[in-house]
Amino acid sequence: MEQYRTRSPQYGPRRDRPPGPPRQPVPSQAGRGAGGEPVRAARAPGPRRRPAQVRRPLPAPAPAAGRLPNPRLTGLGGGLFCAVVMFLLGALCSALFGASLTAYGVLFLPVCVLTALWVRRGDLMTAPVVVPIAFVVGLLPVADGEGGAGGTLMGLVTALATQAGWLYAGTLIAGLIVIVRRIRLVHRRRTAGARPPV
């Protein structure tokens, strides 16, 4: 039997066929120019992005013109505030109103309100305690005495006995304000604890 030899295929286009389309560039050479430099694809013109604006913190709002001051006093600070104010008011009443105990008692009530409002939350229970002490301190320049330590002490006791209504009223007002603030504080804590975590 005769064995036919297989011929290896000849590479390249045959002469009798027309030349095909140009060859595509090799993937490794894609995106490069004739000299081998990288060629960037031209992007379609579109809207330019503006740079992100840096947000600056807003300045703290200025306090309103008609708003009352709202300091936070410690227990000791509240006691000193109330005592000093009542002593000055007692001296003022002694100089202007002829040691009028009624005027002193009337001025005692707003001082009690301010002391109970301005004391901080941790020292709320000190307000009803320091208010009566400040009342006694303020009575020193108002109380009438014949002279000497004994006369001043007797005038102080007499003023306390006759003006006990103002003392009880101021202490009661301070106590009520403290109780209301305490209830609101407990309510806020319970509301904050009942909120689900974010």
Image: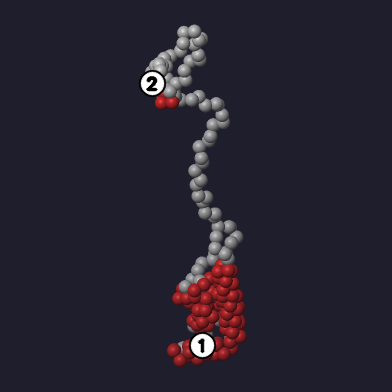
| Display colour scheme | secondary structure
Instruction: Tell me which residue sits at (55%, 60%) in the image.
Output: 198
Is residue 156 in sight in this rendering?
yes
Q: Quadrant of the N terminus?
A: top left
Name which residue lies at 55% across and 88% down: 160
Residue 57: give x, y in percent of width and height. Answer: 50, 50
Residue nearest the observer in this picture, 47 or 156: 47
x, y percent for residue 179: 58, 78
**What is the crowding at mark 1: few (fewer than 14 residues within 10 Å), some, or many (at least 20)?**
many
Question: In this picture, is 20 found above or below 176?
Answer: above
- Residue 61 location, quadrant: bottom right
**Separation of residues labelled 1 and 2 (CA atoms):** 107 Å
Question: N-terminal of the two: label 1 or label 2?
Answer: 2
Percent across and percent down for residue 110 are 58, 74
**Rendered residue at 52%/85% (across/down):** 143
Q: Which one is in front, 122 or 134?
A: 122
- Where disc 2 sits, the SS reads loop
Residue 181 location (% of width, % of height):
58, 73
Secondary structure under the numbered disc 1 in the rendered image: helix
Q: Are marks 1 and 2 in contact (CB under 8 Å)?
A: no
Q: Which residue is mark 1?
A: 156
**Residue 97 sits in quarter:** bottom right
Mark 1 vs mark 2: in front: 2
Q: Residue at x 54, y 74 (%)?
A: 115
Q: Which mark is residue 36?
A: 2
Identity, as a three-letter code, of the amino acid under mark 1? Leu
